[in-house]
Amino acid sequence: MNPYPPAPWHMHGSLWLSVFRLGRAVDAHHPAGTYGVALVSYEEPSPLTYHELLLARTTKDSAGKGAVTITDIWVDSPASQAGGRALWAIPKELCDFDLDTSFRGPVTSTDWTATVERRPIVEASFTDVSRAALRVPFTGRVEQPGIPEHPETAHVVMKGNAKALPCRGRWSFAADGPLGFMREARQLGSFRMAGFRLAFD
């Protein structure tokens, strides 16, 4: 029996995302361009509950529509790691997270850290009022090149709704960590999606 649920995954939680512009190619998987870095908390009643850090670059899918490709991603759930790799060719690795959230009136303050074997990947902090936002729909596309667990290119559609607003976001990428090259990228903006409901298929 697989340790993960079948597709689609109907997920609930919150996402904090910042958009960056990377001015030069780092390697074949990280060309110059626009990237999103996100931290996600998947919560009940999601079929799996876990935390996630991802880096994704903007691209065009095979139909010429706007999409993203996830280049780097970590979770703290072995079941999510296995499912992401087998179902959608998402190259999930494992790491540890610390998440601290506080509230003051409508303002939410959130601090994250992500580490691999006690070595830091990233620290991030956010301030937002997204809990007071109106719920709005969203749709996104993901195109993932094949990996050993899923050799064919995977095409994913995400549909859902969330309370989303711009937020203040600050990131610190560990210089000797796997995302150290993002230290030279220029941050363009940040937003939070609070209380999202998402179908990932």
Image (spheres, rainbow, N blue to C red):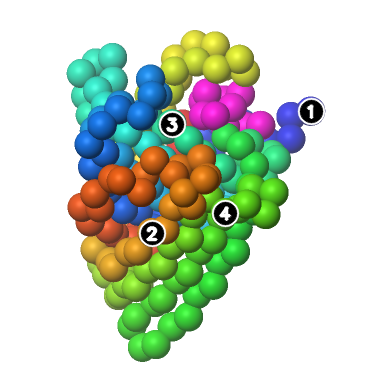
Q: Can you give x and y, in whole percent of width and height, for residue 14 in the image?
A: 44, 59
Q: Mark 2 vs mark 3: give the one in front.
A: 2
The Cα atoms of the two marked residues, 1 and 3, are separated by 28 Å
The Cα atoms of the two marked residues, 3 and 4, are separated by 18 Å
Name the mark on residue 70: none
Asked if the magenta segment contains residue 89, the reply would be yes
Which residue is denoted by mark 3 in the rendering? 71
Q: The magenta stretch spans which residues?
A: 82-91
Name the mark on residue 171: 2
User: Is the residue 170 above or below the residue 34 in the image?
Assistant: below
The Cα atoms of the two marked residues, 4 and 2, are separated by 12 Å
The Cα atoms of the two marked residues, 2 and 3, are separated by 18 Å
Q: Amino acid at mark 4?
A: Pro
Which residue is denoted by mark 4 in the rendering? 120
Q: Mark 1 vs mark 2: give the one in front.
A: 2
- The quadrant of the picture occupied by the N terminus is top right
Q: Earlier in the sequence, mark 1 or mark 4?
A: 1
Which residue is denoted by mark 1 in the rendering? 1
